[in-house]
Image (tube, rainbow, N blue to C red):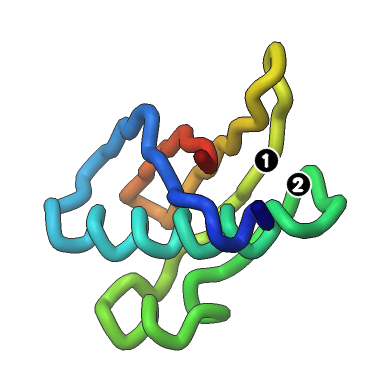
Amino acid sequence: MSNQFKKAVIDDVTSTNLDSGLQAVLLDCFEYAMKTLAVTLVHEAVFHTTDFVTVEKRGGAGFALKLRRSVPGSRESWQGEFTNSTQRLEVMGHLE
C-alpha cells in the first residue's frame, strides 16, 4: 500500500505554551506533511505553516516546521518540530 493512503499515528507530543486548539491544528499539519513526504526520497524538510492554506486559515500561521525521517530498526518514523518565537511543539509519528 502506498504511504499516502496509510494511517498517520502520533507516538509522542511535547508542547510549550500551546493551547489544545492550536496543538490540534499543528498535529493535523504534521500528519499531512508526513504523508506527503513519505512517498518521496526526502529525509529532511523545512516548511512554514503559511505554506499550508488550511493551517493558516485555522490560526496556525507563524510557525516553522522541521520534519525529519528516520528508520530505527524496521519501522520508519518521523520527527517534527514546530517553532515560533515563544511556542514549540515536538511530535513523533509513523504511518501504518
Query: What amino acid type is highlighted by mark number 1?
Result: Arg
Q: Residue furthest top?
A: 73
**SS class of the residue under badge 1?**
strand
39 above or below 89?
A: below
- Is 60 rendered above or below residue 1? below
Q: Residue at x 70, y 18 (%)?
A: 74
Could you say which disc has been placed on residue 44 in the image? Answer: 2
Earlier residue among tags 2 and 1: 2
User: Which one is in front, 3 or 30?
Assistant: 3
Q: Are marks 2 and 1 in contact (CB under 8 Å)?
A: yes
Query: Which residue appears at 56% of the width and 36% of the height?
Result: 79
Q: Gap between marks 2 and 1, in whole Å?
A: 4 Å
Q: Which mark is residue 1?
A: none
Residue 22 picture location, percent across and down: 22, 61
The residue to which callout 1 is attached is: 68
Residue 13 image position (x, y, % from top left): 33, 33
Residue lying farthest to the left in this orientation? 20
- The crowd level at tag 2 (other Cα within 10 Å; few <14, some 14-19, many 20+) is some
Q: Which residue is located at x 36 percent, y 61 percent? A: 28
Instruction: Name the amino acid, label 2.
Output: Glu
- Describe residue 71's horizontal placement relative to residue 47 as left or right: right
Front residue of 58/34: it is 34
Left or right of 84, for residue 37: right
- Give the crowd class for mark 1: few <14, some 14-19, many >=20 residues within 10 Å: some
Q: Position of residue 33 (x, y in %)?
A: 56, 61
Q: Residue at x 81, y 58 (%)?
A: 40
> What kind of element bears circle 2?
strand
> Could you tell me residue 19's position as x and y percent?
13, 53
